[in-house]
Image: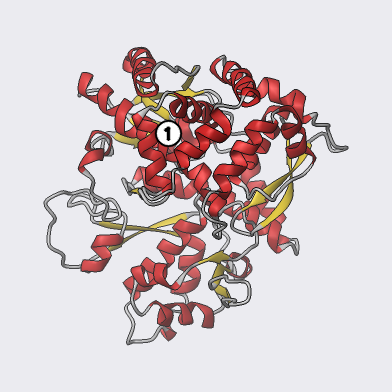
Amino acid sequence: MKKLKKINGRYSSKHGWKMVISKMIFDYVNNHKNIFPESLKWDELLYIISKMEYKIFTKKYRDLAGDFIPFPSAELKRYKADYSKYLDFLLSIGILDKKNYSTYKKRCTKYKFNYKKAYLSGYRIFDIKNIEINRSIKHPKNDYLFQGYKDKDLAHLTKWFNDDLQFDENNFLELMPSKLTKKDKMYHIDDDELFRKIYLRIQSYNRSAEELKNKNFRMSRNKNSDNRFHTNLTNLSKKLRQFVRYKGETLYSLDIKNSQPFFIIVLIEGLINKNNNIIRNINKVYGNNNNGIVSKISSTFLSDKEFQEEFEILRKWILEGVFYDEIIEIYNLQKAKNGKYKIKVYIENKKKTITKGFESIREASKALTLRLLYTPAKKKDEHYNAFKSRFPKICDFFVFLKNYSGGKKNSYKKFPKLLQHIEADCIIDNVTKKIEKKHPHAPIFTVHDSIVTTEEYIDEFQDLMFNYISEYTNGLTPKLSKECWCDDDITDL
């Protein structure tokens, strides 16, 4: 149990060990318990299923409808050293499908749960099962264990994940649209991808609700990755925010408008002014032995007159909060026949570009801008060329940061990683800490660049957020938008 306690979501003397599993999967597997190998442990099997499903339902993977999800052996071994024996059982009863690793494509083994098989076997209730593990374990000093992650630097945020953080299950169930149950008819069609897409969307909502309701809090932060603080709230659909309460009070968030573009301005201006906060993060991401990346940027870009002129235009748009309004004109997006704005989106997990439709031209423009920042430098199309024709030097700056690793594989990831590190350093390690010191009794949560609290403190937090971001950036202040977690429309879950 020691390893399980180290990795799993949560133990509480009040609530016990909790694992969340799709009820349909649990019922199907439980129906085959009579052939489960006696040499294996049932609780460990459920634990592995829970961990795999958790990954599938995260924002990163749940859009990969009908596809296999990568599960590296090193990751699975963290769940259970002899994980393969448990997966062999799931494969043998047909509830798990496997795609072997490929040395040629350099891809690890992938898996997907066969939800449709369970559904066609009669398990049609789209529900979540919360399972208690009844084992003799040593009571930990701290009731709340978050994926074995303990960081004193985050104590100002982790302390608010307690029994006062509530999920209004009654209203959630009452307001769930009737058409959600009517969609059950759609599952009879022979379309595995559509089935999985609809099912995962429904289950992701149910799972988020169940975990919050039962205080299955999850927290993680990887300083070698994006350095962001990931929690139940960061993985929560915006449609479910209206059901989250703290001591019964509605939550409000302060969001940085044009967030990713804003941190580009923070990066460039930080380089111009030699801001230690920015230089420190560059060294973290690119390494202290970076062969003078800062001096190369200075000589190649910062001293270039055209670059300076382009930067001033972007700076003005972003600080005034109109970047996406202006960039729409550059992309020149047109509606397709179905009324949506279709653009090409790079899917990192599939290593390919797909066409995706957006209802709003603004959302389509945001997706294009994120693609500009997050995709390999070689991925170019008419929208990339449109941006480059307007901001050629800025575009060259992006390419420089993406390629600055001696041509190593995935070097393009370091640029967006740098922006995420600057964002996390600013919001998590500076702004929220200073706010907490001033208001130690005010609940404070984060959703990456957003700060969340109750109505009582939101206006005071807004003023402080402005001031502390300005301190961190040596004078830059973004536009902030205040949002009540109370009015989201869930008629189209």
Tell me if 105 is positioned left or right of 17 in this view. right
Its colouring scheme is secondary structure
Residue 70 location (% of width, % of height): 53, 66
From this view, report whether residue 223 is shown above or below residue 387.
below
Tell me if 140 is positioned left or right of 328 in this view. left
- Disc 1, SS: helix
From this view, report whether residue 332 is shown above or below residue 458.
below
Report the quarter where the N terminus lies.
bottom left
Tell me if 112 is positioned left or right of 271 in this view. right
- Residue under label 1, please give it: 423
Q: Is residue 187 something one can see in this rendering?
A: no
Front-most of residues 104 and 278: 278
Residue 292 location (% of width, % of height): 44, 43
Front-most of residues 406 and 368: 406
Residue 259 location (% of width, % of height): 52, 28
Front-most of residues 122 and 431: 431
Q: Is residue 411 something one can see in this rendering?
A: yes
